[in-house]
């Protein structure tokens, strides 16, 4: 993968994230929103619970502003800006300069 990434610097930007970052994962907001209303429900069995969860997820699906909010909560965007390179790049003339 690293070879592929380094061979396409003109159009591909690699952004490394920590291994476990729930605050950068929009799905965490989806699950938190969905579970918020499940606390007081009582399902007869797992099948009924699955139906309820599917119904709640479908409600979220048809609320684009809510989905945008889950993404905004992370601070991420769908069109990330490439990281800013130091002015001395690409010759690495600023090595040792802090």
Image (spheres, helix red, strand yellow):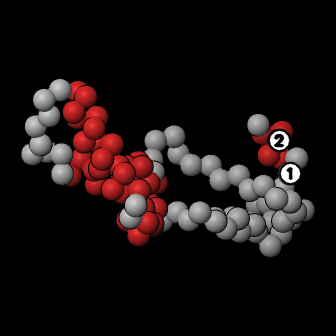
The residue shown at (78%, 55%) is 12
Please state the horizontal and vertical placement of residue 91, each as a whole percent of the image: 90, 62
Split into 4 quadrants, where in the image is the C terminus? bottom right
- Is residue 45 shown left or right of residue 54? left
Q: Nearer the viewer, residue 24 or 29?
A: 29
Q: Which residue is mark 1?
A: 8
In this view of the protein, can residue 92 be seen by the observer?
A: no
* Looking at the image, residue 28 lies above or below residue 49: below
On the image, the x and y values in percent for residue 95 come to: 79, 60
Q: Residues within 10 Å of mark 2 (few under 14, many from 20)?
A: few
Q: Which residue is mark 2?
A: 4
Q: Is residue 40 left or right of residue 57?
A: left
| Residue at 76% in and 60% down | 96
Q: Residue at x 46, y 41 (%)?
A: 20
Query: Element under label 1?
Result: loop
Image quarter in which the N terminus is found? top right
Q: Residue at x 88, y 47 (%)?
A: 7
- Indicate left or right for 60 with 48 as reference: right
Q: Say above or below: 33 vs 2.
A: below
Residue 52 percent coordinates (x, y): 25, 42
Asked if the residues shown at circle 1 and circle 2 are in contact, with their CB atoms under 8 angstroms apart, the answer is: yes
Label 2: state its secondary structure.
helix
> Looking at the picture, how far across and down is residue 56, in whole percent?
29, 50
């Amino acid at each position: 993968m690293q070879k592929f990434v380094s061979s396409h610097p003109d159009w591909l930007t690699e952004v490394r994230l920590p291994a476990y970052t729930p605050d950068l994962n929009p799905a965490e907001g989806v699950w938190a929103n969905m579970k918020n209303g499940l606390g007081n429900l009582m399902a007869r069995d797992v099948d009924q619970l699955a139906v309820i969860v599917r119904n709640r997820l479908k409600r979220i699906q048809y609320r684009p502003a809510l989905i945008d909010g889950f993404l905004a909560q992370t601070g991420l965007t769908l069109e990330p800006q490439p990281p800013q390179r130091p002015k001395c790049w690409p010759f690495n003339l600023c090595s040792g300069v802090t």
